Image: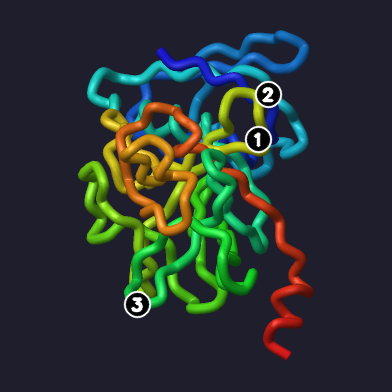
Amino acid sequence: MLDIFCTTTCHYIRDYLQFVHWNLESFSIVDKQRQLYPNVAIQLYLQSQIQLGFVYHRLTLHVIDYEADNIALLDCQQRSAEITEGLYEIENVFGHKFIIPQQQNSGVYVGDIGPPEKRIFRLEHIRYREYRLRHCQSNTILCIYQESLNNEAPLVLNANTNQTLTFESVGNNNSEYYIWPTHQRPTNRRKVLDVYNDPYGRAGQNGAQVQLYSFHGGPNQRFHLRTVDENILVSTHQ
């Protein structure tokens, strides 16, 4: 059994259910007046004429044993943040350096040297709480090289990729995020974006590689998304 606490409209709970196999035993809901509706029929619940403004505070799913992947995926999506689409600079917390592409190849590193437009990304919403980061200057996508899940797999910019990312708030801090690639299996989700930090302190220097690494929650794995005014990008192309 998985309990999900949320405050959302029926429309978004229908989105939640799309991540779970249709072969559910049952599920129940509790509304904001604490009224319990047990064993709600999925077919009834998914009808479009259900009042979209109705707010549910608790969703209880009872699923069969082999749905572990779908439960884990649902849980990952529940913990992922909703981010507003737009332009951002991506700043690593460790040394307050920004993700910047390398000049000589498609790799990326952290730094604070060069024109500001070089470090601007457009956050694109793909599905539910999955996003893509498109580098504005080169029109390429930030992704993990060859979809590797190995430690120290480099991040690169690639024009031909379907990779997406989710953003998880660090505790109650809505300004810092862990960034998770979505191509890892939900039941074995362990790798996040990371800035190379060996020896300790390297992550705070210009030129440190942005890579994939096992989650430990340190400052070199936490990122700020700094909003960029659309007009700034327009002015750089005039």
* Cα distance between the residues tagged 2 and 3: 52 Å
Q: Residues within 10 Å of mark 1 (few under 14, many from 20)?
A: some
Q: Which residue is mark 3?
A: 104
1 and 2 marks in contact (CB < 8 Å): yes
The x, y position of residue 14, in whole percent, is 55, 38
* Label 2 vs label 3, nearer the camera: 3
User: SS for tag 3?
Assistant: loop
Q: Which residue is mark 1?
A: 10
Q: Nearer the viewer, residue 31 or 51?
A: 31
Point out the tag, 1 or 2, that comes first from the N-terminus.
Answer: 1
| Image: 114 above or below 208 | below
- The residue under label 3 is which amino acid type? Gln
Answer left or right for 104 relative to 125: left
Point out the tag, 2 or 3, that comes first from the N-terminus.
Answer: 2
Residue 43 visible in the displayed image: no
Dividing the picture into quadrants, the one containing residue 193 is top left
| Image: 187 above or below 208 | above
Residue pictured at 45% horizontal, 49% vertical: 165
* Cα distance between the residues tagged 1 and 3: 49 Å
Dividing the picture into quadrants, the one containing residue 188 is top left
* Cα distance between the residues tagged 1 and 2: 8 Å
Residue 158 visible in the displayed image: yes
* Label 1 vs label 3, nearer the camera: 3
Q: Which residue is mark 2?
A: 56
- The residue under label 2 is which amino acid type? Tyr
